[in-house]
Image (cartoon, rainbow, N blue to C red):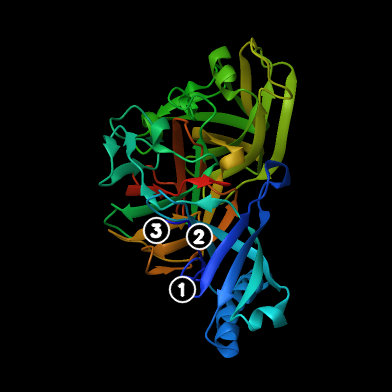
Amino acid sequence: MANLFTITDGTTTVSLNAGSYLATSYKMATVEERDLDHVTETLEVTVSGASLAAIQTNVRAIEVLVEAAKRRSRNQSGPRIYFTAQWDGEGSAWRAEVTDARLETTEVPDQFRRSKVDVALVFTRGPYEGAEVQLTLTNGNGTNNTAGLVIWNHDDANTGHDNWVEIDAAEIGGTLPAPIRLQFVSNINANRFWRNWWLAINAYNDPANFTHVIEGEARVAGYGTITADATCSGGNYNALSIVNTGRMDWDLSAAFVARCAGYPFRLLVRYVGTLSVNYAQACIYDSTGLVELMAGDMVQADALGVADLGVLRIPPDYYASGYMAIRLAIRFWVTGTKTVCVDYVQLMPADTTRLMVQRGMVHVLNTQNGLDESEGRAYGGSQTAGQPIYILKGQPLMLTPGKTQRMYLFVTNDTASDIADNWTLTAYYRPRRWSI
């Protein structure tokens, strides 16, 4: 089998090495020419035809797709245009989105007399993506599961109550971070208005052993009262009486700090009961809680009882092995005397955190929601019959080749974040590479 190249919009496909087209040279970009997103390359093609009109028609078939690629880059409208390559001996084609292109011709009059014309397709593309592959997922509800794995909206010692799934190192091929596709099916037989879906991938912080949820009741003694509540993660929350301002502290062990390895983390807080916080601020202190090492943004309280306290690097500044334990603290500002109740704090790797904000739809049993990072879209419904009810924020969820990794979840509804919410999840990805 020869090397096969096409340019396509998903409906119309021009095979650039078959019929009236013969690809004669593919000038791929060198490593030095590659940037983080795109490369520009040239495919030389001989276009033939029984007449001048036939040659012109064949050339225009390429030009139409070239113009469509430019138009999509300008307006983000119309289908994506892909250049595909299937090398001799490969079982399937790899695709790369074309973001810019032009068609160059030379020596046209002489070549017309020989019923052909040589053209150069100069195109700018992203990485190559392979065929979509389903991922096997693992958590407390199953191992190497492809049928659909249950994922909960909290993570505690209850069997299977996990808001994460693990993906084995051998699962992810290719050489570049690869886009994931997720499909959630609701298991809740009640109306839900899921508003914010926080998702993140942990590939670099010892994910199999990393503690991404810090329970409120794990606070340092003297920084609140542990209170039983079956609607909370771990069955408890921490209650702190405050006059105008106060803070909660949690010890972060030396082993925990080593796993954080200096990476930035987004801190999400689940409150309990009537929200009484005006402002909150996450900080890092020394192991005694006396010296402030880093302070995050002062954040106004969210009426949903969930706060995004922004990003902290753990440990602050530059990481090196051998750091001692430190403390995480949250400062609170209230009016008068109030009791602040914290269920847990969730740490999301900030470099890979994705937020899906729902525009407004009620969800019931078996409702589907999806995220397709290869196409940069989130939707309500199935992959082929979805509705654009989500706004995407943050970084795309990308899987790292050759790494065991976990994906974390944190979802809010229209009133709070319900730890009883759960979904059945299936996941897919497309391997990526720059060249062959």
What secondary structure is marked by label 1? loop
User: How far apart are labels 2 and 3 at the CA level?
Assistant: 29 Å
149 or 55: which is nearer to us?
A: 55
From the top left corner, tell me how far across and down residue 288 is, in percent: 66, 12
Residue 54's place in the image compared with 354, above or below, is below
Q: Disc 3 designates what residue?
A: 369
Of the two numbered discs 2 and 1 on the same chain, state the one appearing first in sequence: 1
User: Do labels 2 and 1 touch, CB within 8 Å?
Assistant: no
Of the two numbered discs 2 and 3 on the same chain, state the one appearing first in sequence: 2
Q: Nearer the viewer, mark 2 or mark 1?
A: 1
The amino acid pointed to by label 1 is Gly
Q: Disc 2 designates what residue?
A: 84
Q: Residue at x 55, y 15 (%)?
A: 253
Horizontal side, residue 197 vs residue 294: left or right:
left
Mark 1 nearby-residue class (10 Å; few <14, some 14–19, many ≥20): few
235 or 203: which is nearer to us?
A: 203
What secondary structure is marked by label 3? strand
From the top left corner, tell me how far across and down residue 23 is, in percent: 55, 64
432 or 411: which is nearer to us?
A: 432
From the top left corner, tell me how far across and down residue 426 is, in percent: 34, 48
Q: Which mark is residue 19?
A: 1
The amino acid pointed to by label 3 is Asn
